[in-house]
Every structure is written in C-alpha cells, then in structure tokens.
Amino acid sequence: MTMPTPDPERSRTRIVVAKPGLDGHDRGAKVIARSLRDAGFEVIYTGLHQTPEQIVRTAIQEDAAIIGLSILSGAHMHLFTEVLRLLKENDADGIGVFGGGIIPAPDITTLSEMGVAKIFTPGASTRDVIAWVDDFVASTNQP
Amino acid sequence: MQQSNASALASAALGGDDRALGRLISLVESDPGALLQVSPQLAASAQRAHTIGVTGSPGVGKSTLIAELLREFRGEQRRVAVVAVDPSSPFSGGALLGDRIRMQAHVLDRDVFIRSMSNRGHLGGLASRTPDVIDLLSRAGFDVVIVETVGIGQAEVEIAIYADTVVLVSTADSGDSVQVAKAGVLEIGDVFVVNKSDRPGSGVIAADLREMLSLGSHADGFDPQVLELSAQSHEGVTELISELARHRAWLSSTGEIGRLRVRRAETRLRSVLAELALTRADLLDDGAAVPRAAAQIAEGSLDVREAARTILDRTTEPPRDR
C-alpha cells in the first residue's frame, strides 16, 4: 500500500472545532472536523454545548492557531462577540476565529468588522474551508 | 523560535501561566532546537507530581474515568494536568482529538490543565514527545499528572516506564481467562479497573483478573487490586483514589520510585541518543548521505548495518547542530 506523505506544516496546525450554545445540531461541526483531519490538520473537538469561556480556555490549553465555531441557533452575534472579547482579555487574540452556520449577510459584514476572520454559509465546500485555513496559516506566518 | 523567546516562555509556564504552558508544549512537540535549549531550565525545577497512566482498549471508558479522577482530586484541592493521546491518521498525518469532550466540565477550573496530543505516527501508546510533556507538567506545579494513552491492543507498554502508577482499564467485553493470561499489557497494571461494572459479565472478568494476579507474582512485589466500578455513575471511584495513594506510598517506602526513575532516565536517554544520531546523519553532506546509502542498499552494493556504522562514524564530529 502506498501512503501519501503527511504535510508537516498542516500537522503542526492545531484547530479547535466547537459547538457553542444550546443548539444540538453537530453534523456540520463533525463534517468540518473530519475533513480538516483528512487534510492533515490536528483537530481538537470539544463536543456540544460549550460556553465561550470553555472554548477560549480550551484553545489556550491546546495552543490552537484557529478556532472554528458552528452556530445554527441564531445566537451568533452574542457568541462570536464573547469569544473575541475573551481571547483579547487572555492575550490570545492571535488565535484566528472562523465560523459556519446560518448567518445572514448583514451580520457577516458586522462580524468581519469585529474581527471574525471568515464565515462559511450553507453550500460552502469542505475544500473551501481547507483552502482558507491554509491561506490563514500562511498569512500569520509572515514575518 | 528565537532562543530568548523559548526561555521566557519556559519561565512563564513554570510560573503558572497557562497560555505560556500551552505554547511551550507545542514547542516541545515540534521544535527540537527549542527543546534542547529549555531542557536544562526545566530540569532545574523540582519534579513533584504523581504521574498516573490510564490505559486500555478503545471504548473502555478511559476519558470518562479521568473526568471522575479530576473531580475527586479537585475535591482534595490538588492541581491536576491531563495529557490525552489519540492516534494520527497514517494517511494524512492529521488527527481528530476528542478525549477532552468527557472532561470539559473541568475546563474552567484554573487548577486543571488538559492537553490533547496526536501520537504523530508513534507506536507504543504515546506520542514520541509525550515523555517530555509529562516531564514538563510534573515540574510546572501540578500535584498529579494523568496520562491517557491511545486506545491500546496487547503490546503498548510504554506508559509503564513514564507513569509512576498504571491503571489498566477493561470491561466485561475484554475477553476470557486466556486473554487474561497473555503476556503484554496485563503485566504492567498497578491497579486493575473493570469499568461499566453494571454490565453482565463484569464479575467474571474481575475474577479472571484476580486469578491471573494470584498466580503470577508481580515482578516488583506490589499486590495490585482489581476494582469493579462505574465511572459514568460515579460508583467506586473513591476506592480507586485510595488504591492510587496506596501504590504511591508503596513506591516511596520500598525505594521503588528511585529505581523507576533510573529506568525512565535510561529509556529517555536512549531514545534521545537515537534521535540525535538520526538528526546528525540527516545533516551529513547536506542531507544527501542517507538517501545515497539507501540507494546503494537497494541495489545490493551496500549492507544496511555497514552503511549505518559508516554514517554514524562520520557524525561523531558534527559540523553544526548545537
């Protein structure tokens, strides 16, 4: 059996995938976690019903480069705001935050102004997500 | 990473800064140069933690049991770190690390630190850098360091060297008396747990384990107990805490802890030696020496051991790897 060579840059990139808040629909989060794994990243999955505090503490302990949040509950404005605030408060705002879910276009603009690095909406392919992660990691590695 | 950065990170991490500790663990995992540099600094800090390994097949409830241990140890006001190892994909090198899902109830506790690790293709139940991470955490002010191995089969016994106390977790589905008599992981347990004890057959496997233990003498003279418990319903965990304490007391009173530390140091030294030799070999002739020899071995004009000896001889005066 021939095995593809793992990409060392990707396997050094740690990504926390989390489901904040009360919605229990974790299929999207699991699909993203799985496809990032298959692309060679180290993915830490937190499971359901995480508070912003839990997510930020997890990202700090795990030294994540990126946090991915899946939100389908409509509470995205509050949850992203809290995660960004806590990252800043913990001197960890170098950690990139992206999200996926049902998020209206005007909110996407606001979120991006607040500092959310990227929002994926339904229909985005896992390939888009992987390409974005590669670009994000490359941009943060610039001197 | 610049040297002064690594050093500042190590000072902050040893001083209790979680962000620094998280980043330092990544350095230890991925940057041999930085590790070499901070290693003496870390070694100067005292090692006082009780290191506990939790091992067993996939799905026996290791993570859930560790969440219970966290609850009990925190009840005693002890600071606890957890290192949870999961396997990487042999194809992509990626990993999905999910052990901490069961432990997230403790994540906001400032005296708990949980870190997931990919084994990055290393066999033996741990990642190749897990011993370094255990060593780091045991010097960073934690009273207890718990290590969860990957879900294991029959032969992953590395944890026995790197943990003071090994908890071997099984369930009613773990096999009959012949499985129990086999060599391998069953020989390394200091405490045997039959988890999910409400399942039919738990008593049988516990009896088989006790019989196995009564036949063979544990090599070092400790008499391990078999505990039936249910981590999920919080039953029997206090007995496990007592057993962990009993084993630790035994390690100290017999002087076995000293002998274990010598064995551990020797194993680490050997593995660092092997790694250093390989690193130096890879630097020879700007990286060309090993592939060139490999080509000659493949075509039959060079013997593999002869090639290794020649390369090793050439590395004794390294041009630049310090």
Image (cartoon, coloured by chain):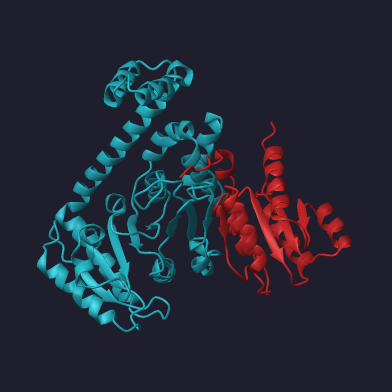
Chain colours: A red, B cyan
Residue A34: x percent and y percent?
Answer: 59, 58
Identify whether B116 is placed above or below A49. above
Residue A53: x percent and y percent?
Answer: 63, 63
Residue B169 found in image quarter: bottom left
> In the picture, which quadrant includes the C terminus of chain B?
top left
Can residue B141 be seen by looking at this rendering? yes
Residue that extends furthest to the right in the rendered view of this protein:
A106
Identify whether A5 is placed above or below B108. above
Residue that extends furthest to the front in the rendered view of this protein:
B299
Q: On the picture, is B137 further left or further right than B169?
A: right
Q: Residue visible at 53% across and 37% down?
A: B8
Q: Residue visible at 71% across and 46% down?
A: A131
Q: On the picture, is B73 further left or further right than B17?
A: left
Q: Camera-side residue: B98 or A6? A: A6
Q: Residue visible at 64% across and 61% down?
A: A31
Residue B184: x percent and y percent?
Answer: 23, 57
